[in-house]
Amino acid sequence: MKRNLSISLVLLLLMGGELYAQKTSEGQSSSEESYFLTDISYINDAVFMGRRDSIAAPYILPSIGYYDQSGIFVDVSASYLTRAEEQRVDLFMVTAGYLFDSKNWSGGASGTAYFYNEDSYNVQSEVVADITGILSYDLKALELSVYASSYFNKNSSPDIFLGFMADRTWYVFDNHLLITPRISLYTGTQYFYEEYYSTSRLGNRKGQGKGSGSSTTTEVASVEIAQASEFNLLNLELSLPLQYRQQQLIFSFTPVCALPQSSATLTTEDAIFEEDLRNVFYWSAGVSYWFNTKKSN
């Protein structure tokens, strides 16, 4: 059922496979209808491929999407940075794609354009677009998914990512509550991370020097990552998405433990050193509401 599939995959597609996925209860109407899906979520920090900024980036993320019965969808969303010193709309995204569901197979593909605030310190802030695909197979006892994407950066080569996810969903309380423990592995290149370090870390903060009456930015030496072009294991992630469905409302909460891998070797004009990657715990919570464009007969 495309409604079930889209709610399962859309957040994986929008967030690059890492945030969380929502699944509705089994046993809904099997009719394939066009509908709108609205959502407002909160995430306590922006984490991508196990990487994050040294300063937390908590976001409120409202979104609205249209999902046609053919499988085509379009979604627009914004990310409002809630940190007291930075409050602003930090990111605007537009995504379009296609979802399918055929017996035990399901999947989707999407393209997303990213419009970051010029002062954003998000670890993805130099990304301008991505193309992402997910393919899943339901073994009943376990659902296996593969993820592939290409992320396009402002001033460097695109990144390629591959991922693997395994999860199992338990339905309780008359199928209203879904519990989906998941393990995910992500591999890829790190050009996005090299650009981020060159603009938002090691003294290269965007907007630096933009104090009162000043419009200049302090120039700092460039940063290179030796492994940027190498294809390495980047992140092992353990998550426990929880979703509660009540009629057309879906409440979600997802704790995530990210175990980043493959520490980068950073080269500046003054030094060469290896970063100290640390495990990250972060979480997200949200509420979604979907409604058909017309009533079923």
Image (spheres, rainbow, N blue to C red):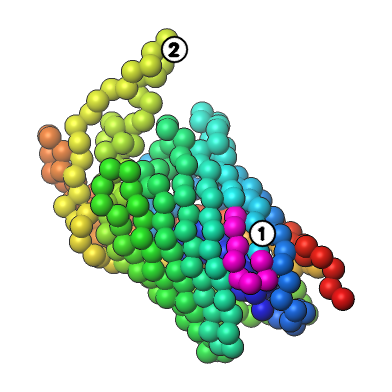
What is the C-alpha distance between the residues marked 1 and 2?
A: 43 Å
Whether 178 is drawn above or below 92: the answer is below
Q: Is residue 190 left or right of residue 284?
A: left
Q: Quadrant of residue 208?
A: top left
Q: Mark 1 packing: few (<14 Cα in 10 Å), some, or many (20+)? A: many
Q: Is residue 43 left or right of residue 198?
A: right
What mark, if any, has residue 212 been given in the picture? Answer: 2
> Is 234 covered by the magenta stretch?
no
At x 59%, y 48%, the residue is 77
Q: Quadrant of residue 215?
A: top left
Q: Position of residue 164 (x, y in %)?
A: 40, 74
The mark nearer the N terminus, 1 or 2, is 1
* Residue corresponding to mark 1: 66
> Is 71 covered by the magenta stretch?
yes
Question: Given the image, on which type of amino acid does mark 2 rest?
Answer: Ser
At x 64%, y 56%, the residue is 65
